[in-house]
Image (cartoon, helix red, strand yellow):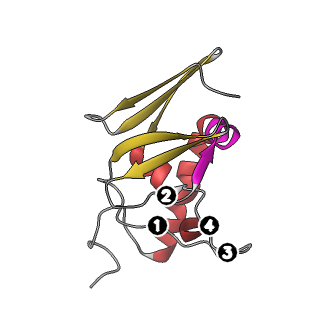
Amino acid sequence: MVPDNIKLHKKSRTLELVYPDGSFELSAEFLRVHSPSAEVRGHGIGNGVLQTGKKFVAINSLEPAGNYALKIFFSDGHDSGLFTWSYLRELCTHQTSYWERYLAKLAEAGESRDEGLIGKF
């Protein structure tokens, strides 16, 4: 499902996606740690790399990728991985459970959303 409107809110570091059935805001951090790139997901099942220290990442810009996806340019230099319309919708509808799962993985690994605070001593 393609959003009717996309708004980048740089001050709050969120991306707002407006659909006929509602509006969703996804934080830059949430999008960054759920990037569909090989850097995040890995090159095979179970090869994903836990993203840490992304609490203060921002979205610098957006670019359409054909008619099927959005390319997001993050402040930490990450810009690989195309967020397809269906994947963005999935992130919107499962945001709470995906975020809880991410936080649990961070805790299990002894890592932090803040760069350099936990697991780096």
Distance, label 3 to label 1, CA atoms, is 15 Å
Measured as percent of width and height from the top left, residue 26 is found at 47, 38
Give the mark toward the camera: 3 or 1: 3
Residue 51, numbered label: 1
Q: Earlier in the sequence, mark 1 or mark 2?
A: 2
Q: Earlier in the sequence, mark 1 or mark 4?
A: 4
| Type of amino acid under label 3 | His
What is the magenta range?
A: 82-90
Tell me which residue sits at (37%, 42%) in the image: 61
Q: Which residue is mark 2?
A: 33
Inspect the magenta stretch and tell me whether residue 89 lies in it: yes
Q: Is residue 103 above or below residue 2?
A: below
Measured as percent of width and height from the top left, residue 36 is found at 60, 57
Q: Earlier in the sequence, mark 3 or mark 2?
A: 2
State which quadrant residue 8 falls in. Answer: top left
Q: Is residue 20 above or below residue 17?
A: above
Disc 1 residue crowd, few under 14, some 14–19, many 20+, Cα 10 Å: many
Measured as percent of width and height from the top left, residue 10 is found at 29, 35
Which quarter of the rendering shows the N terminus? top right
Distance, label 4 to label 3, CA atoms, is 7 Å
Distance, label 4 to label 2, CA atoms, is 10 Å
State which quadrant residue 70 falls in. Answer: top right
Residues under numbered marks 1 and 2 in contact, where contact means CB atoms less than 8 Å apart: yes
Give the mark toward the camera: 3 or 2: 3
| Type of amino acid under label 2 | Val
Front in this rendered view, residue 117 or 82: 82
Measured as percent of width and height from the top left, residue 30 is found at 47, 49
Q: Earlier in the sequence, mark 3 or mark 1?
A: 3
Where disc 3 sits, the SS reads loop
